Amino acid sequence: QVQLVESGGGSVQAGGSLRLSCVASAYAANSYCMGWFRQAPGKEREGVAGINSAGSTNYADSVKGRFTISRDNAKNSQYLQMNSLKPEDTAMYYCAADPSCTTITQKDPLTGAYVARLRLKNGDFAYWGQGTQVTVSS
């Protein structure tokens, strides 16, 4: 059983930044697929960003260029740096982990090449944290 503990949520004004952290309890968690999801009131939980053990990442279109996911395998930790926050980013943010990543093939809009990317679906992750609230005011 893997336990995930998030921290770093809070309230900021639009344009501000926050950094979320997540620590995993499992010994082998440094090889796990890690991700961040969020759920706003009245909406379904959605994938925000994911990272595999080698450091390959994927992002939801709504956060590309503003959010950065990273991990420190030595600390069994992952992070989500959120910049240029918008009121629509307000949500409960959840850390997620799974022993393996699910990948999909997508066409890169810049190069036209088909590349394998980490999929960000709820069912792809077996372990979840309790969540940390992020509130962005206008």
Image: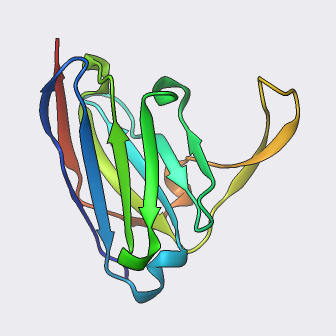
Q: Is residue 85 left or right of residue 73?
A: left
Q: Residue 75 in the image: x percent, y percent? A: 35, 76
Q: Is residue 1 left or right of residue 138?
A: right
Quarter of the rendering occupied by the N terminus:
bottom left
Q: Is residue 53 left or right of residue 17?
A: right
Q: Quadrant of residue 6?
A: bottom left
Q: How is the image coloured?
A: rainbow
Q: Residue furthest right?
A: 113
Q: Residue 135 in the image: x percent, y percent? A: 16, 30
Q: Residue 39 in the image: x percent, y percent? A: 32, 37
Height in image: 120 above or below 107? below
User: At 48% across and 85% down in the image, what residue appears?
Assistant: 28
Q: Quadrant of residue 68?
A: top left
Quarter of the rendering occupied by the C terminus:
top left
Q: Quadrant of residue 106?
A: top right
Q: Residue 70 in the image: x percent, y percent? A: 45, 54
Q: Residue furthest bottom?
A: 27
Q: How many marks?
A: 0
User: At 32% across and 80% down in the image, what residue appears?
Assistant: 25
